[in-house]
Image (spheres, coloured by chain):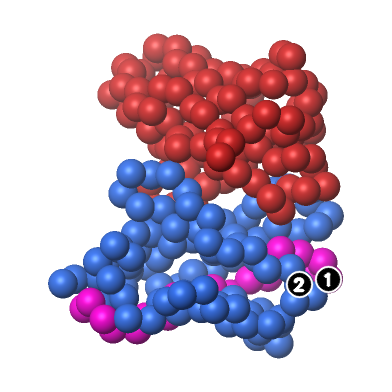
Amino acid sequence: AQKVTQAQTEISVVEKEDVTLDCVYETRDTTYYLFWYKQPPSGELVFLIRRNSFDEQNEISGRYSWNFQKSTSSFNFTITASQVVDSAVYFCALSEWGSQGNLIFGKGTKLSVKP
Amino acid sequence: EAEVAQSPRYKITEKSQAVAFWCDPISGHATLYWYRQILGQGPELLVQFQDESVVDDSQLPKDRFSAERLKGVDSTLKIQPAELGDSAMYLCASSPSREMAYEQYFGPGTRLTVT
């Protein structure tokens, strides 16, 4: 069965601190996709990144970086030098190739960045 | 940039009333998804359409929920009668095809409050 676990319910940091959001997934498929989304208080889901299961290369985009490790079934997200605008709920999600589109989301991690 | 449109953005209704939400996917996208997001949880798929056909409604509470996409373009999700537990964010997404389900674009959502 497919499952996404975000063990951190809430994280609070002070501006400019680095913060890592954890994501652990379960799947039986060898082909799958992993995602991170940001949901600000306004409610819309903002797409951040997609990774397929064959690409374990870490990715950096500005202050954001992602660490994908198949050996530990983890896809962690790090924000460097956090800013108040990073405050939001962040969701990790999984889509198995065979599921034809069913995105399985974790319960989300609420990040609060204080000035 | 093309976007998924949803209306209304906010809806307050009394329990036992009927309520409907509308979604207009990105032009040319064959696959349309409705998700429900209960407060504090990640989104969960309710129904998936391929053109005008339902391909997955296994999580749709069919005694009170219905969804249609008559011409394979825009879609309507209806709840009748609404219950207090239906209070949630209802998100619509679209993708070019089921095979490209990893490329889902989300609309801004409809936040439903049932009183």
Corner quadrant of residue B73: top right
Number of other residues with Cα within 10 Å of mark 1, as a class: few under 14, some 14 to 19, many 20 or more:
few
Q: Secondary structure at mark 2?
A: loop
Q: Where does the magenta region start and end?
A: A14-33
Q: Supply the letter of whichever chain is blue.
A: A
Q: Supply the letter of whichever chain is red.
A: B
Task: Evaluate whether residue B95 shows in this view.
Answer: yes
Chain on which label 2 sits: A
Corner quadrant of residue B59: top right
Mark in front: 2 vs 1? 2
Q: Residue B63 appears at what percent x and percent y?
A: 60, 21
Residue A38 on the magenta span: no
Q: Which residue is mark 2?
A: A53
| Location of the C terminus of chain A (image quadrant) | bottom left
State the residue at coordinates (19%, 71%): A114
Q: Residue B39 appears at what percent x and percent y?
A: 38, 46
Q: Is residue A15 left or right of residue B12?
A: left
